Image (cartoon, rainbow, N blue to C red):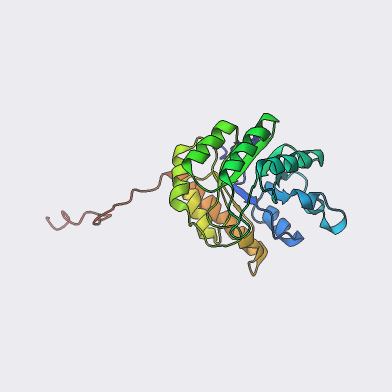
Amino acid sequence: MKQDTFSLGGKKFHSRFILGSGKYNVELIQAAVEHAGAEMITLAVRRANSDGEGNIMDFIPKGVTLLPNTSGARNAQEAVRIARLSRELGCGNFVKVEIMRDSKYLLPDNQETVKATELLAKEGFAVLPYMYPDLNIARDLVHAGACAVMPLAAPIGSNKGLATKEFIKILIDEIDLPIIVDAGIGRPSQACEVMELGAAAVMANTAIATAGNIPQMASAFRKAIEAGREAYLSGLGRVRETGGEASSPLTGFLRD
């Protein structure tokens, strides 16, 4: 049976769960790797650039791909500077572009994200841009050289779920790049739902980090993502907009 993998930046991944940055602790990282199967973990460059207990890289297992993000950047120039620093620190060529001027809702600046993506792609980075789901912007990101598109489901850290579901579905249908749903996923069932739509992967942090039992929640996310992916690959049954349809014939068996 052919393995169900997907590729980013020329690298193959089996797990479709990615641990986001934010509420980091050793238990969370261990749970993400051991119970959720994470093969990629994001980190803020400021954490990687810290000494002593603040250096989160000390706790990420070998073999896990690092995805530095440009958290704190307010424009394309700042994002490019942070990405270059991450590469100098030995974090590799992957980078998640996050550009936010809005400090209340932490919504991404789509226009500046396109600019940063184009600049970084030209420098050989594998760019995963975080964006508000907009079809025209997603197409611009494809042309700019992104290796995936990362639309938000809801504001970062909110656990509100699939507030932008219909727009994410449009991107999945129209964009020929992996769509990785990022931010706002609060429950395993929501992760399952976006995988059923055809998303390539799901990124989460707060939903697991704030759970009462972190390892158990990480395991639940893994199972939900795998179930959603399997359902998508199987070809989901059609939805009837009106009326109903019996699963077995209602006539014929009384004729004899």
Picture quarter containing residue 183? bottom right
Seen as rendered, the residue at the extreme left is 255
Name the residue nearer the viewer: 34 or 123.
123
Name the residue nearer the viewer: 209 or 2.
209
The residue shown at (76%, 59%) is 26
Residue 91 visible, this angle: no
Picture layout, residue 148 above or below residue 166: above
- Quadrant holding the N terminus: top right
The residue shown at (22%, 54%) is 249
Image x and y of residue 107, in percent = 58, 53
In the displayed structure image, the side of residue 155 where residue 58 appears, left or right? right
Residue 117 visible, this angle: yes
The residue shown at (56%, 44%) is 110
Image x and y of residue 190, in percent = 51, 57
In the displayed structure image, the side of residue 87 where residue 127 appears, left or right? left
Question: How many numbered marks, from 0 up?
Answer: 0
Image x and y of residue 112, in percent = 61, 42
Seen as rendered, the residue at the extreme bottom is 212
